[in-house]
Image (cartoon, helix red, strand yellow):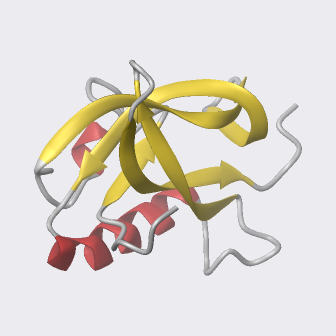
Amino acid sequence: MSHQAVVAVFVYGTLKRGQCREQCWPFEPIRIDSGTVQGNLFSRPDYPALLPGDNRVTGERWEFEIDQMGRVLEVLDEIEGTDSNSPGDLYHRRSVVVRSLGGGELGPAYTYLYNRDPV
């Protein structure tokens, strides 16, 4: 992955368009692209859980202005139950490469990986 600034978040569940937490975003994005990341998605009864893996997980890459990213991550960290990726956190924020549905690279994004046993 290049060293460009990460100005996007990849979401795969309740923060996507039309889902129950869509209204939680603190800013309107510059753009939203459908895409995929590498991982394994578990369907828990309360919310989805993404873990590292070899499958392709479909979701949305929400891109923001660089000066908005601090607030975006602050809000999402609270929603996702992370505190600087501490051992007891529900999710950990990580940088991933997002690919378009056609396979081309959309760019880097932060996403939230589940930090517990998903079952």
| Residue 90 horizontal side relative to residue 110, left or right | right
Residue nearest the viewer, comparing 44 with 4: 4
What residue do we see at 15% from left, 43% from top? 31
Q: Is residue 7 above or below residue 85?
A: above
Q: Residue furthest top?
A: 102
**Does residue 85 appear left or right of residue 21 in this picture?**
right
Image location of residue 86, percent across then percent down? 74, 78
Residue 109 vertical position relative to residue 48 in the rendered view, above or below: below
Residue pictured at 22% horizontal, 37% vertical: 32
| Residue 21 is at least partly visible in this image | no
Task: Tell me: 49 left or right of 37.
Answer: right
Q: Is residue 85 above or below residue 62?
A: below
Residue 100, by quadrant, is top left
> Where residue 76 sits: x, y (%)?
42, 61
Q: Nearer the viewer, residue 105 or 19?
A: 105
Horizontal arrangement in the rendering, residue 101 relative to residue 33 (left or right): right
Residue 46 position within the rendered picture, expressed as x and y whole percent measured from the top left: 64, 30
Residue at image location 15% in from the left, 50% down from the top: 29
Q: Residue 3's x, y, as percent? A: 43, 74
Which residue: 34% across, 27% down? 19
**One can see residue 93 in this view:** yes
Image quadrant containing the C terminus = top right
Looking at the rendering, which quadrant does residue 21 occupy?
top left
Image mark count: 0
